Structures are given as C-alpha cells and as structure tokens.
Amino acid sequence: MSTSAVPLKVLFVTSEIFPLVKTGGLADVSAALPAALRALGADVRVLLPAYPALLKGTAVKWVAAHGLFEFGEVRVLSANLPGDVPALLVDYPPLYQREGGPYQDRHGHDWHDNALRFGLLSRVAALLASGQSPLSWRPDVLHCNDWQAGLAPAHLHYLPGPKAVTVMTVHNLAYQGVFPLDTALKLGLPPASLGMDGVEYYGEMSFLKAGLHYADQITTVSPTYAEEIQTDHLGFGMQGLLRQRKARLAGILNGIDCHAWNPEADPHLAAPYGLKDLKAKGENKRALQERMGLEVDPKVPLLAVISRLTHQKGQDLILAAARELLAMPAQLVLLGSGDKHLEQAFLGLASAHPGQVAAHIGYNEGLAHLAEAGADIFLMPSRFEPCGLNQMYSMHYGTPPVVFATGGLADTVVDCTPATLAAGTATGFVFDAMSEEAFLAAARRAVTAFQDKKTWKQLQENGMKADFSWEHSGARYLDLYRRLLAEQER
Ligand code: ADP
C-alpha cells in the first residue's frame, strides 16, 4: 500500500481553496501543497464542501451517495477545479448552497450552522478514509486542515476496520471551532468521545481539539510556531495538550506558489521585472501611486500593508506610529478588510493625508499583486504568525519586509545587520519586542537602508533569490506520511 512503486494516496481536507473560495492563507496552501505533492508523485485529492463558487462553471460528476444519520443522503461529486488536483465535493444543498463566505454571511456574521457545515465535511472525510467508503479510491493518508476538518480524525478513530493514517495541520490555533458539548453527539460521535480524552474543551467541544487529540500526527506551518503554541502565551488553551503530544508535533514551513506569484510573468503588474531588470519595478511603483491617488514620486519610500485587519496582525502599531512614519518621510498604502475600527482608522488616516496615505478597504487579488510589486517596503508587524505568506511574496518581489520576530516571520526573514549583509543572507528587518518603539526603530532602519542604493539592491536580491517554493515543504510532508504508514504497518 505504501511502497514506493504504488503512489501514496492522500485525501486533503480543507474549507477553502484558491482561487475560488479564499479568506486567507489556507486557500493558498490548499491549492499549492496538493499540487506540489502530486508533482512529487503522490496521488492527492482535495475534499471540500460543494459551495456555489465551486459548482459554478466547474464540470462535476456524481461519484457516490451515502446515507448519513440525520442528514439523509449526502452526495460526493468529483470536480475539476483550476489547477491539476482532482477534487471531491461534499454536496448537501441545505448546508452549502447559499451566497456568502465559507464561514460567514454577507454581513460578517458566522453561519448559525457552522458546526453542521463542517461537521458534515469532517464526517464524510472520515468515511472516505475508512473501509466503509462508498468510493473505490481509498486514501492511505487523511490530511486535515484547521478546525473545519478537525472532527475527521475523531470520527475515523471510532470507525471499525482498516483506515488511513491521520495528519492534523494547524494553520492558525486561534480558530478552534468551539460549540456546546452535546453538538458532538448530534454530529454522530459516540458518548465515549465526550471526555477530556476526547473532544471536550473547557466544558464545551472543540473541533480543533478533537483533531489535535485523535490525529496520528500534528503539524503546523513553521518550526517556530510549533514551539510557540506549546507556551501559555500563544497556546490559546491548547498548550497543555500540545506539550503532551510534543513528540507528535512538527513544524513544516509553507511555501509560496511561484507561478501565481512570479514578478516576471504576473498579469496584474504594470511591468514585469526580475533579478536582472529590477529597474522595471519602478514602473509598478508609479502605477501603484497613480492607482491609489498618491503623489507620484520615485524617491519617497512607499510602505505597503496587505492583510486581514485584526488584532493578530498588529496594524494598531502602524496606526500608533503613523505620524513618525509619515514624517520620515514615507508614503503608505493599505489593502485590507476586517475589524471595522481599524478600517475606519486607516480611512481616516488616508483622508487626513491625501496623496501620502491611501487605504483600499476590501479584498482585491490584483491590487495585492501590484502592491507587492510597487511598494518599496512591506509592513507585517503580526503579534503572532503561524507562517505568513505575504512576507514571502514581498521578498520574492524585491520588497523587503519589516516583521515582528514570531512564528513563520522569524523563520523566513533574516534581519539586516552588517553580519547578515556580509554573509549575503539579509532579507528584511526584524524587531523583537511587540512595541510601537521597536516597530518604529525597525521601520526607520528599513527607510535608512532604502536610501542606500547598494545595500538596498543587495537586500532585494537576497530575498528574490531565496527559495520559498513548495517543493521542499512537499517533500517533508511526504516523508512524514511515509513514516506514519510504516508505523501503522508495524
Ligand atoms: P492569513 O492567512 O492569516 O490571512 P497570510 O499572510 O498567511 O495571512 O495569507 C494572507 C493571504 O491573503 C495572502 O495571499 C494575501 O495576499 C491575501 N490577502 C489578505 N488580505 C487581502 C486583501 N485585502 N486583498 C487581497 N489579498 C489579501
């Protein structure tokens, strides 16, 4: 089953996928990691709910139907989504056929039946990974992502017969899928699962806790975050369990999709550029300044933020430091949405500084690409960051980032010092105290370095040369799958 001659079969369970359903980095990972695993020879399929966005314009084929407790008949469809990875969709119109986001309605309220929506996804995932699967294709590995797939390892644990090994990947521990305890029974789990040694979480149940408890292996998306989530500071209540399962916890860095994010062939840019013709990056700066209504000036450092607006991402530091930042002088572009107070604050800053600050509230993939290319410096002062993609996009686009030393930011950005410059490894600016002063000092170092053409070019080149591709991470996941299968066979 797991010998190298036969491709290893992996079912990758996720609640979002780029480009059709995306709220954050999980969507990018769900498109890129399965593709990387396929390129390495694994037979991977992704499993998602049949959201309207996935059915629209997609050729789907009915492959199975199964009666599942109070849901009645649930259909499994096969679908050809963009990219080469075959998809399986859980089709159950009462739960998934509605306009809005995967987790929230158009007004930003969580769907009232999220427990059912993702309970069903998890349940079907477990079924397909068990001997009771209605499909002839049965995975060797069930790879579950975030809380939405967290109940799958629990369900699979209680199913009889042969079954896949399970991996639970935490992309962000802050989202835990917490519901009243009896929800577990409604979702088809047995009473034996209700204890502390099961799905129970401080008197309620948590999808994520279930996954962390029952999965054969836990992974998270950077080595530093794997350490941080075992601490009281960043464990979000799961630190005890994670410490207990430490031997089963690994950190594997995410990669970036170097096809979608390639400055040499990015359709969203005003001008393509690469290591050899960095000058053309300037045309993107001009295009960004024009598009955002900023004063067109090639010399002023242009700082960019592209992000969900939330406490986690530390944008309050940028707001607090805005006066000093702008006095450097510098321009600021923000693209983001989320917390209404932060949205208002950035809009207010933009109207107070026309031509110097611009804020686009909303989600805009094309503008995100242009901003990565057109900005000089990227700001990402996240309080915690499991891996983070934007800092890698920015380094890849020759836009050195300013980051807080946490999680994947600490693992991917090398602080610019005389020593790292001499070693040719410096790629950005890292600050290690979560304070306005420390952030401002790092931003100041970045702006000063920007004025020094030679240093700046070297920083840009180091970042652009760094290998952030998925190939390396994909190989690490494959090793892990093989190890788990070897253990299972023993
Ligand atoms: P997270 O998953 O916590 O939101 P990441 O840095 O891992 O953070 O990934 C964020 C992804 O979402 C990146 O691909 C980024 O470009 C994108 N993104 C975030 N906000 C916006 C926005 N307003 N418009 C376009 N893309 C955005």
Image (tube, rainbow, N blue to C red):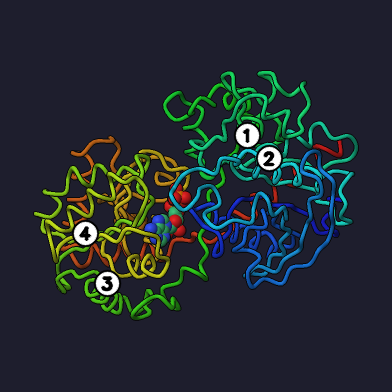
Mark 1: few/some/many CA within 10 Å (<14, 14-19, 20+): many
Secondary element type, mark 4: strand
The label number, if any, that marks residue 9 in the structure image: none
Query: Is 404 positioned to the left or the right of 116 in the image?
Result: left
Report which quarter residue 273 is drawn in: bottom left
List x then y, in percent, for residue 270: 33, 79
Q: Tell which circle, 1 or 3, labels the residue nearer the N-terminal end.
A: 1
> Within the displayed image, which quadrant is ligand 1 positioned in?
bottom left
Residue that extends furthest to the left in the rendered view of this protein? 327
- Observer-side mark, 2 or 1, equals 2
Structural crowding at the residue carrying mark 3, measured as other residues with C-alpha within 10 Å and reported as few (<14), some (14–19) or many (≥20): many
Give, as a three-letter code, the residue at label 1. Answer: Phe
Q: Earlier in the sequence, mark 4 or mark 2?
A: 2
Are the residues tagged 1 and 3 within 8 Å (C-beta)?
A: no
Q: Which residue is mark 3?
A: 288
| Residue 389 visible in image | no
